[in-house]
Amino acid sequence: MTLDKIPRVETALSGPSLAAAINAALQWWHDAGVDCDFADEPQDWLAASNPKPVKPLTKSAAKAPEAVTKTIGGGRSAWPATLAEFVPWWLSEASLAPAGAVRMAPVGPETPPLMVIVPMPEESDRETLLAGPIGNLLDGFLAAAGLSRAEIYLASALPARVAAPDWADLAKQGLGDLIAHHVGLIRPERLILFGQSGISTLLGNDSPNTCWHLRPIYQGDAGIPVLSAYDLETMVARPALKAKLWSRWLDWTGANAT
């Protein structure tokens, strides 16, 4: 409040002398240039007059639903328990290949000296697995090893040809376990896995470009030795890899021992 708005005291509160004293004091401060009333208590002029309290959040944001990974073939409990049941299931199970894709059956006897697994059928396969140039390369390797296709068990990791399969995702879906189950039904003495750059990861190899000999697949107490190699299609394009495979085969089977 400004001092000039304070009313002059016209009547004495306790006599004429008091009224005159008050008027004189006010006039003195007015003549000194003081025309406002001041208070000693500080005030925050920028603060909101009535700040509203912030209400705490009562509901948390909804979590995104976790992706459910599909299991190939319905899981281990749904897989065929015998080879006789496995082959027709392999050719018909919907989760193994796209609808309408041409599927190839595995072929060969049980308990063979060697089981061979390739990533998938050749592009030209229609009735028999590896019936084209890739199969010819395999037949040449087997002949050099003293074997024939009739003596071994030949299978593929996928029953039908698929463009650029995602092996890591297929591993999450249980394809590696299914392959191990298939091997257990056959019970071979040895296993070659053609597909070092991809499908070897299905059987537990985390570094397919550095590991050649995978850990054995155990069926009971017996371990089946596993050799990883480049896929046969790569060997057709790079013939030098055939010599490396042959050298490793000799070391693996002990044929180089003297």
Image (cartoon, rainbow, N blue to C red):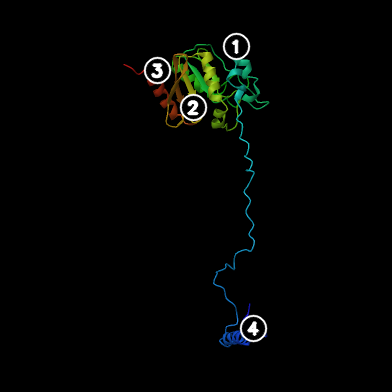
Task: Name the residue beneath numbered marker 1.
Answer: 84
Crowd rating for badge 1 (residues with CA inside 10 Å; few <14, some 14–19, many 20+): few
Measuring 59% from the left and 86% from the top, which residue is drawn there? 21
**Residue 257, picture quadrant:** top left
Which is nearer the N-term, disc 3 or disc 1?
Answer: 1
Residue 4, numbered label = 4
Which is nearer the N-term, disc 4 or disc 1?
Answer: 4
Instruction: Look at label 2 and name its amino acid.
Output: Ser
As helix, strand or loop, the secondary structure at mark 4 comes to helix
Instruction: State the separation of the CA atoms marked 3 and 2.
Output: 20 Å
Residue 200, numbered label = 2
Instruction: State the separation of the CA atoms marked 4 and 3.
Output: 116 Å
**Residue 62, picture quadrant:** top right
Instruction: Look at label 1 and name its amino acid.
Output: Ala
Disc 4 versus disc 2: nearer the observer: 4
Disc 4 versus disc 1: nearer the observer: 4
- x%, y% of residue 77? 59, 18
